[in-house]
């Protein structure tokens, strides 16, 4: 579960996350683990059926540069 309060929260896998709501359809956040970090831009479509994550910076597992977009559609 992601809490949009801007505070750091720990996930079971050791990842520290912090997300902040910008408006009703947009949030930004960071994820940190093993000395690596990444920024996340979250957008929810106005109809609430599509979630898009833009993830940048480091791959938390390998440390390799990362710039990826993930899109999820509600069925």
Image: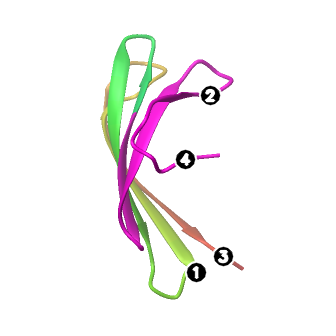
Residue at 43 percent across and 19 percent down: it is 62
Q: Where 58 falls versus 53 (above or below)?
A: above
Q: Nearer the viewer, residue 4 or 28?
A: 4
Image depth: mark 4 or mark 1 in front: 4
For the residues labelled 1 and 2, the Cα–Cα distance comes to: 26 Å
Q: Which of marks 4 and 2 is nearer the N terminus?
A: 4
For the residues labelled 4 and 1, the Cα–Cα distance comes to: 20 Å
> Considering the numbered disc 1 on the image, is that residue within a helix, a strand or a loop?
loop
Q: Does the magenta stretch include residue 22?
A: yes
Q: Residue 3 carries which label?
A: 4
> Considering the numbered disc 2 on the image, is that residue within a helix, a strand or a loop?
loop
Q: Where 39 falls versus 26 (above or below)?
A: above
**Image coordinates for residue 12, horizontal then vertical, percent:** 68, 24
Q: Does the magenta stretch include residue 19?
A: yes
Q: Residue 11 carries which label?
A: 2
Residue annotated with mark 1: 49
Marks 4,2: beta carbons within 8 A:
no
Q: Which of marks 1 and 3 is nearer the N terminus?
A: 1
Residue at 52 percent across and 88 percent down: it is 47
Residue annotated with mark 3: 74
Q: Which of 26 and 69 is in front in this view?
A: 26
Instruction: Write the start and end of the magenta stretch as one range.
Output: 1-30
Residue at 47 percent across and 51 percent down: it is 4
């Amino acid at each position: 579960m992601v809490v949009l309060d801007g505070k750091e929260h720990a996930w079971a896998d050791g990842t520290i996350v912090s997300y902040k709501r910008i408006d009703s359809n947009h949030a930004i956040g960071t994820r940190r683990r093993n000395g690596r970090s990444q920024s996340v831009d979250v957008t929810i479509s106005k109809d609430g059926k599509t979630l898009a994550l833009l993830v940048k910076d480091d791959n938390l597992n390998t440390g390799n540069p990362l710039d990826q977009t993930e899109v999820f559609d509600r069925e």
